[in-house]
Amino acid sequence: MDLRGERWQLKKKKARPEEPPKQRPPQESKEEEFRPYKIILTDEAQKGYKNLSANVKQAMDEIMERLKAWPEVSGTRPYFGKGWAPGKFRMKTWDWRIEFFVDQETRTVTVSKIGHRDEFYDEYHY
């Protein structure tokens, strides 16, 4: 079987004339301008933050920076069970946890607790 015959040759594509680029009218943005959420630490959260080592403080700072872009934050979990409250969430990094409330009307995230996982859930007695 001869594969070099006319039938097996690739056809050359015909050159198309160049079209001028289409210009679209500028579109107005219907989305409102991004406003970051304000982060507030309670006294208990500040006390827990002071007791952290430098590398864990840096990780918590990164989490709090991410929380400013609420609700586009990955890794958050709502509370269930005895610790449940509306708008109450938690995040974790390594063995450390951060508990926070989100108020969408005032665009604030209130960090209520920061601590190690061993003592973090003690008050809820799961």
Image (spheres, grey):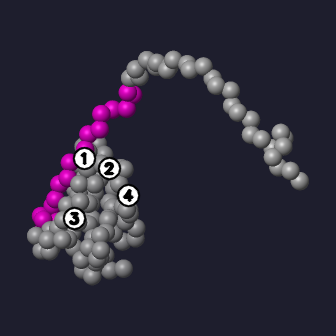
- Measure the alpha-carbon separation of dots 1 and 2: 7 Å
Q: Is the Cβ of the residue at disc 1 closer than 8 Å to that at disc 2?
A: yes
Residue type of the residue flagged with mark 4: Ser
For image coordinates 23% across by 54% down, the residue present is 65
For image coordinates 16% across by 59% down, the residue present is 41
For image coordinates 36% across by 50% down, the residue present is 72
Magenta span includes 36? yes
Image coordinates for residue 73, horizontal then vertical, percent: 35, 54
Q: Is the Cβ of the residue at disc 1 closer than 8 Å to that at disc 4?
A: no
**In this picture, residue 46 sits left or right of residue 17:** left
Label 1: few (<14), some (14–19) or many (≥20) C-alpha neighbours in 10 Å: many
Magenta span includes 86? no
For the residue pair 21 and 78, the one nearer the viewer reads as 21
Residue type of the residue flagged with mark 1: Tyr
In the displayed structure, 10 sits above or below 93; it is above
Image coordinates for residue 15, horizontal then vertical, percent: 64, 25
- The residue labelled by disc 4 is 74
Image coordinates for residue 67, horizontal then vertical, percent: 28, 54
Q: What residue span does the magenta drawing correspond to?
A: 29-48
Label 2: few (<14), some (14–19) or many (≥20) C-alpha neighbours in 10 Å: some
**Disc assigned to residue 64:** none
SS at mark 3 in the image: helix
Dividing the image into 4 quarters, which one contains the C terminus? bottom left
- The residue labelled by disc 3 is 60
**Disc assigned to residue 70:** 2
